[in-house]
């Protein structure tokens, strides 16, 4: 699975993207984030406040409870404002 990080999430995680094999027990985005936070301090900082994290699973906006089974890609980014 490809994980993509944007804006300050990318800066704190220390990379823009990576290919990972998720542990089998992970079922949703929340589980992915919990697993990522065990992988190092950068991830801990990037995902410290889940209220300011948005995600997309296979380019569809989702939430922490969005299932990841069969997904090809998960993107993480801060809230986006436009004008």
Image (cartoon, helix red, strand yellow):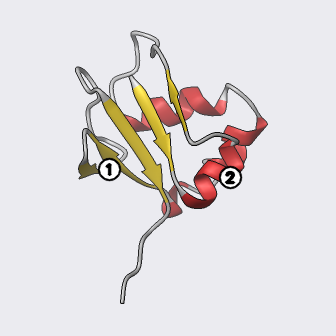
- Residue positioned most to the top: 24
> Circle 2 sits in a helix, a strand or a loop, which is it?
helix
> Circle 1 sits in a helix, a strand or a loop, which is it?
loop
Please give left or right for residue 75 compared with residue 60 in the image.
right
Query: Who's the residue at 40% across and 44% down the image?
Result: 75
- Residue positioned most to the right: 41
- Which residue is identified by label 2? 11
Query: Who's the residue at 41% across and 28% down the image?
Result: 2
List x then y, in percent, for residue 27: 33, 24
Quarter assignment of residue 72: top left
List x then y, in percent, for residue 52: 52, 63
Give the answer, above or below, for where 23 lies relative to 65. above
Q: Which mark is residue 23?
A: none
Q: Nearer the viewer, mark 1 or mark 2?
A: 2
- Which residue is identified by label 1? 63
Q: Nearer the viewer, residue 16 or 38?
A: 16
Query: Who's the residue at 29% across and 28% down the image?
Result: 68
Give the answer, above or below, for where 55 lies relative to 67. below
Mark 1–mark 2 Cα distance, whole angstroms, equals: 22 Å
- Residue positioned most to the front: 16
> Which image quarter is the C terminus in?
bottom left
List x then y, in percent, for residue 57: 29, 40
Give the answer, above or below, for where 18 lies relative to 55. above
Give the answer, above or below, for where 19 lies relative to 11. above
Chain-order first, disc 1 or disc 2: 2
Q: Residues within 10 Å of mark 2 (few under 14, many from 20)?
A: some
List x then y, in percent, for residue 3: 45, 34
């Amino acid at each position: 699975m490809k994980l993509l990080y944007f804006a300050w999430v990318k800066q704190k995680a220390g990379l823009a993207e990576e290919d990972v094999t998720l542990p089998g027990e992970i079922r949703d985005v929340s589980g992915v984030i919990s697993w990522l936070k065990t992988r190092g301090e950068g991830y801990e900082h990037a995902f410290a406040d889940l209220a300011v994290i948005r995600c997309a699973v296979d380019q569809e906006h989702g939430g922490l409870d969005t299932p990841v089974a069969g997904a090809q890609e998960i993107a993480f980014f801060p809230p986006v404002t436009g004008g």
